[in-house]
Image: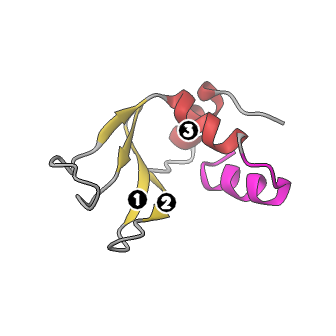
């Protein structure tokens, strides 16, 4: 089952989920994550290991989150990731 951007957004809001880990930076180990602020979603790259001079939250579209969940080919991994977003 694939999830829509709206389903992800509503699940995070209704379950008051404010962040979901994405991956650790391979250089410094900083845990990147999706961060929800109100009805908006951001990506926190956190570190500047890849040359970013602005480690602030980067605005993303809810479709980005839904696509990341939906691209998981392993059903167990997909279910676990979806649950982290409240789905």
First-in-chain label (1 vs 3): 1
Q: What number of labels is visible?
A: 3
Q: Position of residue 86 (x, y in %)?
A: 63, 48
Q: Nearer the viewer, residue 9 or 33?
A: 33
Residue 21, numbered circle: 2
| Image quarter of residue 33 | bottom left
Q: Separation of disc 1 and disc 3 at Cα? A: 13 Å
Q: Position of residue 61 (x, y in %)?
A: 46, 28
Q: Separation of disc 2 and disc 3 at Cα? A: 12 Å
Residue name at image x 29 percent, y 56 percent? 50
Q: Mark 1: few, some, or many residues within 10 Å (few <14, many ≥20)?
A: some
Mark 2 secondary-structure assignment: strand
Q: Position of residue 16 (x, y in %)?
A: 49, 48
Residue 52, numbered circle: none
Q: Are marks 1 and 2 in contact (CB under 8 Å)?
A: yes
Whether the magenta-drawn stretch holds residue 80 is answered as yes
Q: Position of residue 13 (x, y in %)?
A: 51, 39
Label 1: which residue? 32
* Left or right: where 57 falls relative to 87: left
Q: Mark 3: few, some, or many residues within 10 Å (few <14, many ≥20)?
A: many
From which residue to which does the magenta span run? Answer: 72-87
Residue name at image x 60 percent, y 28 percent? 5
Label 3: which residue? 65
Mark 3 secondary-structure assignment: helix
Q: Mark 2: few, some, or many residues within 10 Å (few <14, many ≥20)?
A: some
Q: Residue furthest left?
A: 53
**Residue 49 vertical placement versus 60 (above, below):** below
**Residue 21 vertical placement versus 55 (above, below):** below
């Amino acid at each position: 089952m694939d999830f829509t951007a709206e389903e992800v957004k509503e699940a995070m809001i209704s379950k008051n989920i404010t962040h979901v880990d994405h991956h650790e930076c391979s250089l410094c180990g900083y845990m990147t994550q999706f961060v929800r602020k109100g009805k908006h979603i951001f990506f926190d790259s956190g570190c500047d290991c890849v040359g970013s001079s602005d480690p602030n939250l980067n605005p993303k579209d809810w479709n980005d989150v839904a696509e990341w969940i939906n691209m998981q080919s392993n059903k167990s991994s997909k279910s676990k990731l979806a649950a982290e977003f409240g789905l």
